[in-house]
């Protein structure tokens, strides 16, 4: 990671000459290296440290306590595969929300282990969301899109989520799904394009495979995904616009395959929530 370029981000992106120059450099870094790092101010660094420490404390708990943090409504919460432990942070949708009542897949309250953990992680993901918004503006400028708000229009109040993971010592592959990934490892923030960025740009920007190098069992790796709205229909923003993808279907299919035995997946199947998803996809395709 020593050769990865590091950039500071402006307080806001307005399409100024400096924004255009920075945007061009970000795209250049992605095309050359597949990633770039983001410098943090002291307040952002504090939020990173707080989130890492809170996650370490959570993972140190006995398994019987950690494993309580599950739900059959959402993929948020705890899961384990061998020696890899994951706490997934998703949109925290109240039970009284109309989408929960309408049986939208993966929608429901997040099973937080404590109010303290909820506070630390939501503060941090909110910060990453603000970084993601700036990057969406800059990427649109760097891609010479006619409207530099076009990518933000896809991700405003999007289905942003984060995988907080504890790996055994060694080298581990990280997920490269989604639109924009911000990986937090050893206190550094690294931005990489995901599968959906490759789709939206018709392959101009390629997905970057990621690996985490873990030196101790107490190390925490976090991958934040800045995503489109769950009910958004997507078409490429570069090149021919003849492809179509429904984000909610993409997300649900992905996590059903990753967690075939999870109670969330079983409930989606038993209650035929995929038919609800198909209806959402058809509706979204009309305006996409």
Image (cartoon, grey):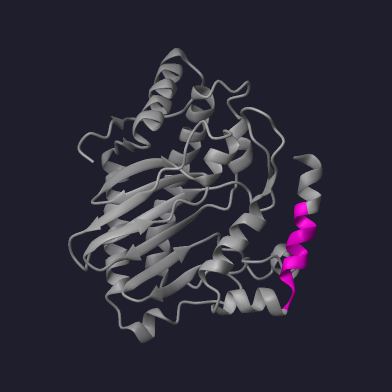
Q: Quadrant of residue 236?
A: top right
Magenta part of the chain = 271-281
The image quadrant where one finds the N terminus is: top left
**Residue 276 colored in magenta in the image:** yes
172 and 234: which is toward the camera: 172
User: In the picture provided, is 103 more to the left or to the right than 94?
Assistant: right
Please state the horizontal and vertical placement of residue 272, each as a whole percent of the image: 74, 74
User: In the picture provided, is 228 more to the left or to the right than 182?
Assistant: right
Residue furthest to the left in view is 215
Can residue 272 be seen in this snapshot? yes
Seen in the picture, residue 11 relative to 93 is either above or below; the reply is above
User: In the picture provided, is 10 more to the left or to the right than 283?
Assistant: left
Residue furthest to the top in view is 17
Please state the horizontal and vertical placement of residue 131, each as a whole percent of the image: 43, 39
The image quadrant where one finds the C terminus is: top right
Residue at the location (59% across, 37% down)? 200
Can residue 47 be seen in this snapshot? no
131 and 114: which is toward the camera: 131
Residue at the location (45% across, 82% down)? 68
Seen in the picture, residue 248 relative to 202 is either above or below; the reply is below
User: In the picture provided, is 78 more to the left or to the right than 189?
Assistant: right
Seen in the picture, residue 275 relative to 193 is either above or below; the reply is below
Q: Quadrant of residue 101?
A: bottom right
Please state the horizontal and vertical placement of residue 164, each as a whole percent of the image: 38, 62
């Amino acid at each position: 990671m020593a050769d990865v370029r590091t950039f500071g981000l402006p307080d806001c992106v307005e399409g100024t000459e400096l924004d255009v120059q920075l945007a061009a450099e970000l795209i250049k870094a992605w095309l050359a290296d597949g990633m770039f790092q983001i410098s943090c101010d002291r307040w952002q660094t504090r939020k990173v440290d707080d989130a890492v420490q809170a996650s370490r404390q959570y993972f140190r708990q006995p398994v019987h306590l950690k494993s309580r943090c599950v739900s059959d409504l959402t993929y948020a919460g705890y899961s384990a595969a061998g020696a890899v432990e994951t706490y997934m942070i998703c949109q925290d949708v109240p039970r009284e929300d109309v989408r929960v009542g309408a049986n939208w897949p993966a929608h429901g309250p997040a099973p937080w282990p404590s109010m303290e953990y909820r506070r630390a992680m939501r503060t941090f993901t909110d910060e990453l969301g603000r970084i993601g918004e700036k990057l969406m503006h800059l990427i649109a400028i760097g891609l010479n899109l006619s409207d530099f708000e076009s990518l933000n229009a896809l991700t405003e109040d999007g289905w942003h989520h984060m995988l907080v993971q504890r790996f055994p010592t060694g080298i581990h592959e990280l997920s490269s799904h989604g639109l924009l990934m911000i990986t937090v490892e050893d206190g550094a923030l690294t931005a990489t394009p995901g599968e959906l960025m490759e789709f939206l740009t018709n392959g101009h920007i390629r997905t970057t495979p990621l690996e985490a190098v873990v030196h101790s069992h107490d190390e925490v790796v976090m991958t934040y995904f800045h995503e489109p709205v769950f009910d958004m229909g997507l078409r490429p923003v570069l090149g021919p616009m003849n492809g179509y993808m429904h984000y909610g279907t993409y997300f649900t299919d992905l996590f059903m395959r990753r967690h075939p035995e999870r109670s969330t997946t079983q409930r989606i199947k038993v209650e035929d929530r995929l038919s609800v998803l198909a209806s959402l996809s058809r509706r979204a395709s009309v305006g996409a």
